[in-house]
Image: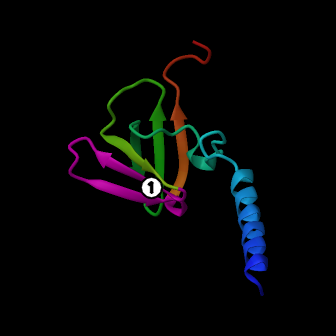
Amino acid sequence: MTTWQILVASAAGLAVVAAQALSQPDDDKHQPDRGVFHGLKVGQFVMVEDLGTVFEIRTLDAKLPTGMTLIEIGEDYLTVQDVSAVKEMRIPIYAIKAVVHVRTKPKGK
């Protein structure tokens, strides 16, 4: 191959890579639905109930301290920390039976 052919092939390859990079959705614009973790937010107070082989995660619509704070939401796990910041627990999604949102106020108010 001549130098000219190498330059043309390299430019074509760069154009393909640039086009693919520009066509990728921007993560900031498209927030994916997080499935069972939908509605959970980092910093939120949660209650964690050990049901034996699985856990139930509960949230309240009021900002009441519950003893545990949600500190990380992974793709397939949650990390919670106790109020004293001594105990940190990572719970895999397969060990979560349910995420329950408890309403303390009537809906719409």
Up/down of 55 relative to 61, above or below:
below
**Quarter of the figure with residue 83:** top left
Q: Quadrant of the C terminus?
A: top right
In the displayed structure image, the side of residue 21 where residue 88 appears, left or right: left
Q: Mark 1 highlights which residue?
A: 51
**Quarter of the figure with residue 97:** bottom right
**Quarter of the figure with residue 91:** bottom left
| Kind of residue at disc 1 | Leu
Q: How many marks?
A: 1
Is the residue marked by circle 1 packed among few (<14), some (14-19), or many (20+) residues within 10 Å?
A: few
Residue 99 position, x and y percent, is 54, 45
Magenta part of the protein: which range? 75-95
Q: Nearer the viewer, residue 89 or 30?
A: 30
Residue at 25% in and 53% down? 87
Residue at 73% in and 73% down? 7
In the displayed structure image, the side of residue 7 where residue 48 appears, left or right: left
Q: Quadrant of the N terminus?
A: bottom right
Residue at 33% in and 42% down? 68
How is the structure coloured here?
A: rainbow
Up/down of 1 relative to 91, above or below:
below
Q: Nearer the viewer, residue 15 or 79?
A: 15
Up/down of 106 relative to 101, above or below:
above
Q: Nearer the viewer, residue 72 or 16?
A: 16
